[in-house]
Image (cartoon, grey):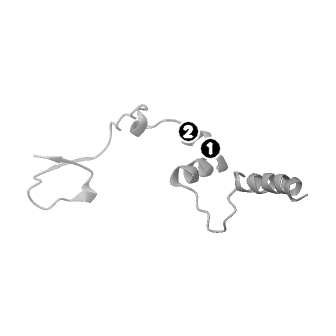
Amino acid sequence: MTIRLAAPIALVLLAACASSAPSSQYYRPTPNQAVQASQEAVDTPEWLKTPDYRHGGPIPPMEANRKVNEQTCTEGVALAAGNLKCK
């Protein structure tokens, strides 16, 4: 009788141990699991999916009428005067 009960109990215990869900309240995902879960949970807007220059996308042209400040860079630099061009 005990042998007949031992097999189903062992199967139940093995099934409980082999479950994919963490049973511990102290479970923490690995960094890869956390990144994957966050990417799947967020609906990224279309404009954010376009590649920019950091990812090999097109580099936007500079404005033709931008302000350029040419000055000696060994002294103090005026940062509010426009794009800096050192002499």
Nearest the camera: 24 or 30? 24
Q: Quadrant of the N terminus?
A: bottom right
The local secondary structure at tag 2 comes to helix
The three-letter code of the residue at mark 2 reads Lys
Can you give x and y, in whole percent of width and height, for residue 16 in the image? 75, 56
Nearest the camera: 3 or 58? 3
Can you give x and y, in whole percent of width and height, for residue 4 in the image? 88, 53
Determine whether label 1 and label 2 are within 8 Å by CB: yes
Instruction: Establish if 20 lies above or below 61.
Output: below
Q: CA distance from mark 1 to mark 2?
A: 7 Å
Task: Please indicate whether residue 32 sits to the left or right of residue 25 in the image.
Answer: left
Read off the residue under disc 2.
49
Task: Please indicate whether residue 48 sits to the left or right of residue 7 in the image.
Answer: left
Question: What residue is shown at x 60% (from left), y 52% (from top)?
Answer: 38
The local secondary structure at tag 1 comes to loop
Read off the residue under disc 1.
45
Question: What residue is shown at x 37% (from left), y 34% (from top)?
Answer: 61
Please, which residue is most extreme toward the right here?
Answer: 1
